[in-house]
């Protein structure tokens, strides 16, 4: 089974699903191999794209979230293996290089 799964998650998913006052724009999502920050294990490639500048945030949102101290992250996953995986968004953790877990910002907080 070869499939391509694009998942917008972490901070981005919380913002998109709960901000009625903020409009999200359509994103151009490339193959995971096209991103600088990526990792491939056993046929599954995971990449991230951070929206950490005003210009980048304006590509995806109608407001500048960086002014609020929020950095949306796009998570891209591609499964080129023969194994099916089920991703549980509530189980995803963002960890810095020191091993500290950074909790996502709930949409209600942003809205």
Image: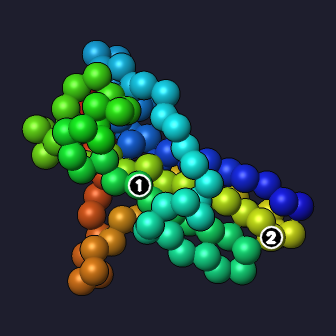
Disc ID at residue 49: 1
The quarter of the image holding the N terminus is bottom right
Whether residue 67 is situated above or below residue 32 in the rendered picture: above
Whether residue 107 is situated above or below residue 7 in the rendered picture: above
What kind of element bears circle 1?
strand
The quarter of the image holding the C terminus is top left
Q: Are marks 2 and 1 in contact (CB under 8 Å)?
A: no
| Residue at x 55% of width, y 44% of height | 29
Q: How many marks?
A: 2
Whether residue 41 is situated above or below residue 87 in the rendered picture: below
Q: Quadrant of residue 56?
A: top left
Disc 1 residue crowd, few under 14, some 14–19, many 20+, Cα 10 Å = some
Disc ID at residue 57: none
| Residue at x 45% of width, y 59% of height | 48
- Residue 15 lies, in percent from the top left, at 35, 35
Between residues 35 and 18, which one lies in front from this camera angle?
35
Between residues 94 and 3, which one lies in front from this camera angle?
3
Residue that sits furthest to the top in the current view: 21
Q: Is residue 40 left or right of 100 when viewed as pictured?
A: right
Disc 2 residue crowd, few under 14, some 14–19, many 20+, Cα 10 Å = some
- Residue 55 lies, in percent from the top left, at 24, 38
- Residue 89 lies, in percent from the top left, at 52, 53
Q: Which residue is mark 2?
A: 81
Please identify, in this view, whether the residue under mark 2 or under mark 1 is nearer the observer. 1
Residue 73 in view, yes or no: yes
């Amino acid at each position: 089974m070869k499939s391509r799964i694009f998942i917008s998650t972490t901070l981005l998913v919380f913002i998109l699903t709960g901000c009625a006052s903020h409009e999200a724009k359509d994103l151009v999502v490339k193959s995971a191999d096209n991103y600088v920050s990526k990792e491939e294990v056993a046929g599954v490639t995971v990449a991230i794209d951070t929206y950490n500048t005003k210009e980048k945030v304006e590509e995806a949102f109608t407001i500048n979230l960086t002014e609020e101290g929020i950095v949306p992250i796009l998570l891209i996953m591609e499964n080129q293996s023969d194994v099916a995986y089920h991703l549980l968004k509530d189980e995803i953790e963002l960890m810095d290089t020191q091993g500290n877990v950074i909790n996502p910002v709930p949409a209600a907080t942003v809205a």
